[in-house]
Image: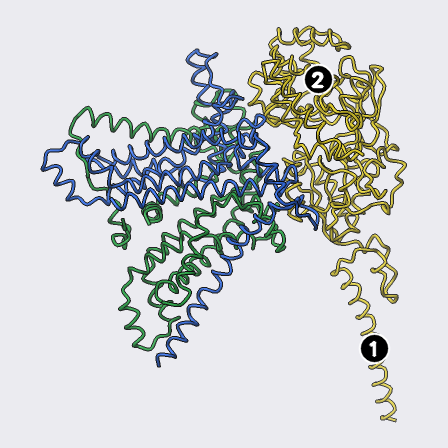
């Protein structure tokens, strides 16, 4: 009897030990899976004994998202990250603020240390997306709901990045400054524009800001697609130039000469070379500067700087044939990203409902989101239609890189050149380089 | 022109002896005036920054640059700069870099000096040449290649990148050590050898202690060098959690161009540690600099 | 016994030299070779592969005159470097005389050398900011509003404004080196001169200068070396702007690599600068050897 009981006991012990090992083993595999940070969801459902874990809960890992919105990293963006992390415990999402975005990212990428999620920068094109990003065709979103969703496709037809927002171009202005100068209506033609400038100047207000020192803020004056759409209503945008020998043609010169003339008439900041972005934002918020040629992402920053929301507005560039609708920042997942599942989930999170765009006070590219932005509303109320551009040909960027053209830097020196002949010579020089290089890239 | 023989104790030799006599009174006044002018040139920017940093931004906007701050002990800007600029992290990273690079480079430097200074071997001349040539290669010119190398080794954005660069490229130090070792009498080695000490022992217990002044100076100069270095962390370790004091200041300042009081406090925050170090260790720093150049 | 010692010696030498030599080869020699290799390729810094393009990069670089015109900007730094030698020497002479408080003056004037370069750069950024510059504040206060100084403009002067920062930082360093050089001249020579009735000017001319010639040449060489490699001040303050007005040879080569992805051309520029500096060093060594024979 005792022997049987003893054997039964041993048997029970062994059995419990076995099942114990079994469940321990199951726990082991799931923790192993967590530790191994497996990319795809299927690997997480390896064991069958534990309750089937929903794919979202098994999400874990860390990603770094590089943004240029340095002023929002600790506020709205931190909240956005937290919202995601709360919904997916086990994940870590870190926003990294980078001020000099273009330069820093290109060096980081060159160093093989791109952040997990980052924005497409100038110099990348259809030919090179695959060198930087993973394809996201399989991303679990409805691409048709998003404006510009097919813009950042590589030569292989795969989608590599998606824009988070849409921007409309126009002139942002401080209404209080206009009132102070006795201006009642926004200028709709160039003549009215010069008039407005003169009145502002007379009232001691800087008509137009440029933040020259930081170079990038003057991009609208010299961005080929923006200029073509605004002045000509031509939706070919950059592709016009792929097919012609002049990179700075009559259209471009019209735009560039406007800002050059403004400089010569002292309608820009007093010491233009010292004018930096932070100082400029302060000035326009306080009404010391009246206008800035930019896009719809800007008005919110004026309000942030202290202006009253009702004092900020936007109107189309005087005489514009169309308001240019342009993709905001396009986000892609780094080719070297390790926690791809987290990156994909967060990208989807950022885009759907325009969460990231709203956190940055820009207009979401998600068509299903209702736009309540008053500044964009005002911009569009002036009756100028909105136009997109066709997708730029990679050849444009390739030729530009080949001839080492930095158009913003160039515009600076063009504006500052007081001698007209010399200025024209500068333009001619670049046209020549463009013409010489073009045949190498266009069949 | 070897000054090293006199510099076994840095303390005494830094008093400058009168070589010239300026007897003309006008000459003396003019000389003092010139020297004072340069002193003012050095101090003025720093004092202006100090003055500005102790004011709040509103105060600064209202009263301008030169008005004295309401509250001389207003360290609010410094506190804000320290936190927002993540300088705690910057200091930590810099200290880690210093903590590893300085001792290791002192060790490798003295080891090379010992091997070259105390032994004769077949390839010695070649070795000397090997160490001499890189002193002519200006660092900036090979940046692209060094960057590629670091990247290919997978060291981009790692602390090791900075450490290896700081240790592996300081040839000047080796020459100073070499000079120093030649001053240490070989008799010391030999008496230790007779007592049965191994070469390693001789290095560790005899040579190194004798080299204390050179080591002290070398250490201080290297600490200064690493603390002040911007380019290496910027190029090779730009990740935000590897920021050093120099790159932290750069990122911080980039955004704050409209708030000069805050900027000033950040600038001074970074500058003050080395200034304090300088006040206490002037002799070592100045003697180190002169030795290095005079070689 | 002898053989044993020799073997032990060899082991020690190898053991002690192994790591430093490896580091040296890796971080000093390898980059140099890599630089040469890169100069013959069309690498864009990202892809795994690249092609050898022979001397194309050399031809391109040598044909692009704007890459060499930028040396005109470096010239401002070279001129400042030369002035720095004169000022440093002058101050050193003053501090070698029988004035009071010499050590204090030396301490203060040397101090900028030890301050963090980034801090110094931003400090001067503030000094040079047109609206906020304390200098301009004074000028405005004195009523000369229209005479405010534009420090960083599109004119060549900006280069001097930037090189002045370097001057401020290093003049004390130059001075200290010269003080040491002057101090190393044996006192007896001066005694003899004094006995012979030489005055200050004569002493300086016939005794001081010949004896420190070597030091002056080395210091000048170091400074010119630095001037040719200038990049820090433009990089921090103006980014080479406006539109290349304050670009230097190095900032241009870095831009070629990181902005335009032309690593091959950037490498060529590095080699050109390297050759230039080596030539200058060679010339200096020849002169020095010539002097020593005297």
Image x and y of residue A216, in percent: 65, 28
> Which residue lies under the disc numbered 1?
A18
Residue A257 placement, left or right of C107: right
Chain B drawn in what color? green
User: According to the colouring, which chain is yellow?
Assistant: A
Name the N-terminal-most of marks 1 and 2: 1
Tag 1 and tag 2 share a subunit: yes
Q: What is the image's colouring?
A: by chain
Observer able to see residue A299: no
Q: Which mark is residue A180?
A: none
Q: Quadrant of residue C218?
A: top left
Q: What is the tally of numbered marks visible in this picture?
A: 2
Residue at numbered disc 2: A253
Element at label 1 = helix
From the top left corner, tell me how far across and down residue B31 is, in percent.
24, 28
Determine whether A176 is above or below C167 in the image. Answer: above
Residue at 83%, 40% in the rendered image: A153
Which element carries disc 2, helix, strand or loop? helix
Letter of the chain shown blue in the rendering: C
Q: Label 2: chain?
A: A
For disc 1, the chain is A
Between marks 1 and 2 in the image, the one whose residue lies nearer the viewer: 2
């Amino acid at each position: 009897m005792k022997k049987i009981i003893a054997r039964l006991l041993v048997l029970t012990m062994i059995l419990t030990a076995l099942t114990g090992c079994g469940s321990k083993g199951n726990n082991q595999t799931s923790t192993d899976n967590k530790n191994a940070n497996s990319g795809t969801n299927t690997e997480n459902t390896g064991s069958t004994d534990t309750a089937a874990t929903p794919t979202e809960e098994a999400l874990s890992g860390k990603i770094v998202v590089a943004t240029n919105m340095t002023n929002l990293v600790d506020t709205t963006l931190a909240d956005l990250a937290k919202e995601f992390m709360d919904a997916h415990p086990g994940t870590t999402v870190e926003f990294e603020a980078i001020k000099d975005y273009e330069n820093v990212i290109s060096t980081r990428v060159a160093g093989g240390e791109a952040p997990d999620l980052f924005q497409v920068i100038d110099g990348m094109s259809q030919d090179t997306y695959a060198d930087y990003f993973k394809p996201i065709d399989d991303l679990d979103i409805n691409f048709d709901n998003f404006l510009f969703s097919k813009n950042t496709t590589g030569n292989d037809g795969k989608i590599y990045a998606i824009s988070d927002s849409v921007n409309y171009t126009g002139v942002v202005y401080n209404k209080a400054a206009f009132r102070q100068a006795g201006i009642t209506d926004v200028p709709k033609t160039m003549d009215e524009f010069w008039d407005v400038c003169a009145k502002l100047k007379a009232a001691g207000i800087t008509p137009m800001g440029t933040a020259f020192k930081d170079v990038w803020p003057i991009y609208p004056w010299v961005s080929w697609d923006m200029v073509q759409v605004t002045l000509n209503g031509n939706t070919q945008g950059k592709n016009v130039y792929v097919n012609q020998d002049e990179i700075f043609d009559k259209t471009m010169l019209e735009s560039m000469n406007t800002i050059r003339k403004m400089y010569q008439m002292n309608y820009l900041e007093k010491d233009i070379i010292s004018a930096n972005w932070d100082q400029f934002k302060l000035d326009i918020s306080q009404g010391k500067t009246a206008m800035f040629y930019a896009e719809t992402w800007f008005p919110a920053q004026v309000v942030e700087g202290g202006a009253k929301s009702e004092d900020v507005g936007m109107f189309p560039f005087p005489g514009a044939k169309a308001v240019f609708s342009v993709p905001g920042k396009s986000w892609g997942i780094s080719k070297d990203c390790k926690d791809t599942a987290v990156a994909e989930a967060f990208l989807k999170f950022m885009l759907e409902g325009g969460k990231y765009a709203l956190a940055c006070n820009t207009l979401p590219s998600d068509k299903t989101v209702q736009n309540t932005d008053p500044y964009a509303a005002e911009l569009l109320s002036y009756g100028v239609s909105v136009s997109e551009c066709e997708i730029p040909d990679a050849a444009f960027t390739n030729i530009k890189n080949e001839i080492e053209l930095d158009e913003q830097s160039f515009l600076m020196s063009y504006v500052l050149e007081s001698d007209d002949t010399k200025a024209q010579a500068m333009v001619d020089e670049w046209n020549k380089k463009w013409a010489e290089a073009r045949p190498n890239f266009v069949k | 022109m070897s000054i090293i023989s006199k510099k076994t104790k840095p303390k005494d030799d830094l008093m400058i002896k009168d070589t010239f006599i300026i007897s003309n009174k006008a000459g003396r006044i003019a000389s003092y005036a010139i020297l004072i002018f340069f002193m003012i040139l050095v101090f003025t920017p720093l004092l202006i920054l100090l003055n500005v940093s102790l004011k709040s931004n509103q105060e600064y906007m209202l009263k301008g640059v030169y008005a004295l701050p309401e509250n001389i002990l207003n360290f609010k800007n410094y506190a804000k700069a320290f936190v927002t600029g993540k300088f705690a992290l910057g200091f930590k990273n810099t200290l880690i870099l210093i903590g590893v690079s300085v001792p290791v480079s002192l060790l490798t430097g003295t080891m090379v000096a010992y091997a070259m200074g105390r032994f004769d071997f077949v390839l010695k001349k070649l070795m000397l040449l090997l160490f001499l040539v890189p002193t002519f290669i200006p660092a900036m010119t090979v940046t692209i290649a060094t960057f590629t190398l670091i990247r290919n080794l997978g060291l981009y954005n790692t602390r090791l990148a900075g450490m290896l660069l700081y240790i592996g490229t300081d040839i000047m130090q080796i020459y100073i050590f070499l000079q120093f070792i030649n001053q240490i009498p070989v008799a010391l080695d030999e008496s230790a050898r007779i007592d049965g000490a191994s070469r390693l022992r001789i290095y560790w217990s005899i040579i190194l202690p004798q080299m204390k002044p050179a080591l002290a100076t070398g250490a201080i100069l290297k600490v200064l060098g690493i603390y002040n270095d911007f380019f290496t962390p910027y190029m090779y370790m730009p990740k935000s959690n590897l920021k050093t004091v120099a790159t932290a200041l750069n990122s911080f300042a980039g955004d704050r161009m409209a708030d000069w009081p805050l900027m000033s406090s950040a600038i001074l925050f970074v500058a003050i540690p080395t200034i304090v170090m300088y006040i206490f260790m002037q002799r070592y720093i100045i003697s180190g600099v002169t030795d290095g150049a005079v070689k | 016994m002898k053989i044993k010692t020799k073997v032990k010696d060899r082991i020690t030498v190898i053991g002690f030299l192994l790591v430093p030599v490896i580091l040296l080869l890796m971080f000093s020699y390898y980059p140099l070779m890599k630089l040469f290799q890169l100069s013959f390729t069309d690498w864009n810094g990202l892809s795994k592969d690249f092609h050898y393009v022979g001397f194309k990069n050399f031809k391109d670089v040598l044909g692009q005159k704007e890459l060499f015109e930028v040396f005109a900007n470096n010239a401002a730094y070279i001129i400042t470097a030369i002035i720095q030698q004169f000022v440093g020497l002058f101050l050193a002479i003053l501090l070698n005389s029988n004035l009071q408080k010499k050590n204090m003056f030396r301490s203060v004037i040397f101090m900028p050398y030890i301050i963090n370069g980034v801090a110094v750069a931003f400090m001067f950024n503030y000094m040079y900011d047109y609206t906020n510059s304390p200098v301009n504040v004074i000028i405005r206060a004195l009523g000369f509003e229209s005479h405010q100084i534009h420090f960083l403009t599109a004119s060549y002067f900006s280069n001097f404004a930037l090189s002045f920062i370097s001057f401020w930082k290093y003049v004390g360093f130059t001075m200290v080196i010269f003080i040491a050089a002057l101090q190393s001249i044996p006192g007896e020579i001066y005694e003899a001169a004094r006995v012979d009735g030489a005055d200050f000017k004569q002493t300086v001319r016939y005794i001081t200068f010949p004896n420190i010639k070597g030091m002056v040449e080395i210091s000048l060489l170091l400074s010119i070396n630095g001037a040719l490699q200038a990049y820090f001040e433009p990089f921090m303050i103006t980014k080479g702007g406006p539109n290349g007005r304050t670009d230097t040879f190095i900032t241009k080569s870095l831009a070629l690599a990181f902005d335009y992805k032309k690593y091959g051309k950037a490498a060529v520029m590095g080699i050109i600068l390297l050759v230039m500096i080596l030539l200058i060093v060679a010339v200096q060594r020849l002169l020095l050897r010539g002097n020593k024979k005297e």
